[in-house]
Image (cartoon, rainbow, N blue to C red):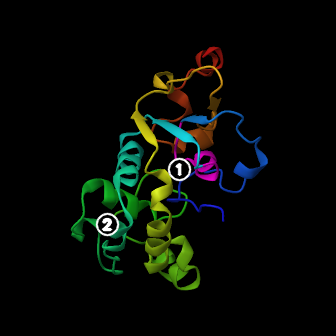
């Protein structure tokens, strides 16, 4: 069975990941990791994520270290609550926050009215008992992964590695990312 996204993130490649070529090597390196949909699809391989955004890197550090029991013990969030009300470490709060606003670039503190209404129709798209259970059931698939916080150039690439490069969008859409396209030298990236 295919692993599902660990969290919702802007620009994620959940639907596109299966259309990319399968990795030939045993090591996947995903700079610009985001929600790491390519790595999630091919999770049985050795995976190194590289992420410049400290919030995303923190979420991945937490996911990689977490176990099913820890995930299942996480509280749900009531409509009037904020993630700040939850007795969780900051990284787990960020994780929940990404589930409070679909395809966002930063975690939310609480659900908007639209998301609360949507949660009734689609519990698999927001933080819910369904997402908590699903995450607990698949958390083990990323426990062997590695996360490096920093620029893509810190990626430990060797001959034979599969490097999946999905940088921020160029232009207006790239401006939505905290470390957007304006701060990225695409010529330097191409040389790299």
Q: Nearer the viewer, residue 175 or 58?
A: 58
Q: Position of residue 43 (x, y in %)?
A: 58, 49
Q: Position of residue 156 (x, y in %)?
A: 50, 24
Identify which residue is drawn at 65% across, 19% down: 190
**Residue tagged by mark 1?**
35
Q: Position of residue 150 (x, y in %)?
A: 41, 30
Mark 1 / mark 2, whichever is N-terminal? 1
Count neighbours of disc 1 (C-alpha within 10 A) and say few if under 14, some if 14 to 19, many if 20 or more: many
- Residue 167 visible in image: no
Q: Which mark is residue 70?
A: 2
Q: Is residue 36 left or right of residue 96?
A: right
Q: Position of residue 103 (x, y in %)?
A: 55, 58
Q: With respect to residue 90, does 52 lie above or below?
A: above
Q: Is residue 70 left or right of residue 41?
A: left
Q: With respect to residue 164, does 78 lie above or below?
A: below
Q: Is residue 1 left or right of residue 137?
A: right
Secondary structure at badge 2 equals helix
Tell me where residue 76 sits by quadrant: bottom left
Count neighbours of disc 2 (C-alpha within 10 A) and say few if under 14, some if 14 to 19, many if 20 or more: few
**Stretch in magenta:** 32-42
Secondary structure at badge 1 equals loop
- Label 1 to label 2: alpha-carbon separation: 20 Å
Q: Nearer the viewer, residue 40 or 85?
A: 40
Quadrant containing the C terminus in the rendered view? top right
Please check the rendered image and state whether residue 121 is part of the magenta-colored stretch, yes or no: no
Labels in figure, total: 2
Q: Disc 1 vs disc 2: which is toward the camera?
A: 2
Quadrant containing the N terminus in the rendered view? bottom right
Identify which residue is drawn at 39% across, 66% down: 68
Identify which residue is drawn at 60% across, 61% down: 3
- Residue 86 visible in image: yes
Q: With respect to residue 135, does 66 lie above or below?
A: above
């Amino acid at each position: 069975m295919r692993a599902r996204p660990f969290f919702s993130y802007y620009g994620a490649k959940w639907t596109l990941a299966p259309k990319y070529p399968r990795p030939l090597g045993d090591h996947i390196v995903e700079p610009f990791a985001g929600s790491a949909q390519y790595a999630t699809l091919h999770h049985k391989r050795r995976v190194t994520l590289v992420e410049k955004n400290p919030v995303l890197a923190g979420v991945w550090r937490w996911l990689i270290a977490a176990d099913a029991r820890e995930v299942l013990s996480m509280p749900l969030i009531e409509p009037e609550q904020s993630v700040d009300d939850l007795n969780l470490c900051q990284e787990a709060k960020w994780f929940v926050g990404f589930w409070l606003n679909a395809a966002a670039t930063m975690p939310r503190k609480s659900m908007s009215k639209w998301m609360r209404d949507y949660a009734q129709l689609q519990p698999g798209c927001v933080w819910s008992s369904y997402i908590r259970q699903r995450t607990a059931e698949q958390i083990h698939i990323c426990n062997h992964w590695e996360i490096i916080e920093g620029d893509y150039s810190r990626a430990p690439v060797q001959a034979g590695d599969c490097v999946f490069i999905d940088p921020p969008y160029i232009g207006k859409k790239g401006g939505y990312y905290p470390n957007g396209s304006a701060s990225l030298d695409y010529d330097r990236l191409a040389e790299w």
